Image: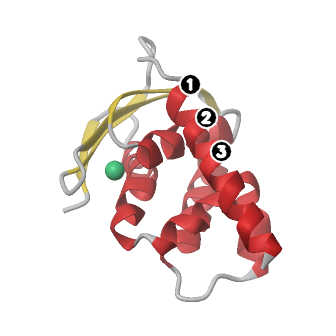
């Protein structure tokens, strides 16, 4: 019981903090990949920018746009989580995050791999918000599919 309450507090605190001070909240002028993600249900609308080097390492990440606290916090934490990772590892983390938020049962292994992102599992209590939290990860998925093309993604 106590654990649950604490997790909720942490969830609130982290999301509010990232919403107030989003990390990597900027357009990258030297982006090698980008995507546009829209969640019409909520009005979340973000552009994601990646700078991936020749060896496939994500050197820089930035995003801009607007939306609810959950979508912005998720985007902010995503940029921190994938920076310095290879494309493959970023895709893996995306899969973990999506499973965390949409899987019927989430294993402890998935939770462990999600690391700090596991606080977003609390979003499941508000099903309408799940798309807010996953939006930027869907945009990441699109941006990694083809580095030299602009991508559009909508959760509709
Ligand atoms: Zn939203």
Tell me, for residue 21, which label it has, or none. 1
Quick one: SS at disc 1?
loop
Percent position of residue 79, x then y = 58, 36
- From the image, which quarter does the N terminus lie in? bottom right
The crowd level at tag 1 (other Cα within 10 Å; few <14, some 14-19, many 20+) is few
Find residue 85 and report its image quarter.
top right
Q: Nearer the viewer, mark 3 or mark 1?
A: 3
| Left or right of 69, for residue 6 | right
The crowd level at tag 3 (other Cα within 10 Å; few <14, some 14-19, many 20+) is few
Q: Residue at x 52, y 46 (%)?
A: 74
Mark yes or no: residue 8 visible: yes
Tell me, for residue 17, which label it has, or none. 2
Task: Give the CA separation, mark 3 to mark 1.
Answer: 12 Å
Q: Residue at x 73, y 52 (%)?
A: 116
Cβ of mark 1 under 8 Å from ligand 1: the answer is: no
- From the image, which quarter does the C terminus lie in? bottom left
The crowd level at tag 2 (other Cα within 10 Å; few <14, some 14-19, many 20+) is few
Task: Give the CA separation, mark 2 to mark 1.
Answer: 6 Å
Q: Residue at x 55, y 73 (%)?
A: 99
Badges 2 and 1: C-beta atoms under 8 Å apart? yes
């Amino acid at each position: 019981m106590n654990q649950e309450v604490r997790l909720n507090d942490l969830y609130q605190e982290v999301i509010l903090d990232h919403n107030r001070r989003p990390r990597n909240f900027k357009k990258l002028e030297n982006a090698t990949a980008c995507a546009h993600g829209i969640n019409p249900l909520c009005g979340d609308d973000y552009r994601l920018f990646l700078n991936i080097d020749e060896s496939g390492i994500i050197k820089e990440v930035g995003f801009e746009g607007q939306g609810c606290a959950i979508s912005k916090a998720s985007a902010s934490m995503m940029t921190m989580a994938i920076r310095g990772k290879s494309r493959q590892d970023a895709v893996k983390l995306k899969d973990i995050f999506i499973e965390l938020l949409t899987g019927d049962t989430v294993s402890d292994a998935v939770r462990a791999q999600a690391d700090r992102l596991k606080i977003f599992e609390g979003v499941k209590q508000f099903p309408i918000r799940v798309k807010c939290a996953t939006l930027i990860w869907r945009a990441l998925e699109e941006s990694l599919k083809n580095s030299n093309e602009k991508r559009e993604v909508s959760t509709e």
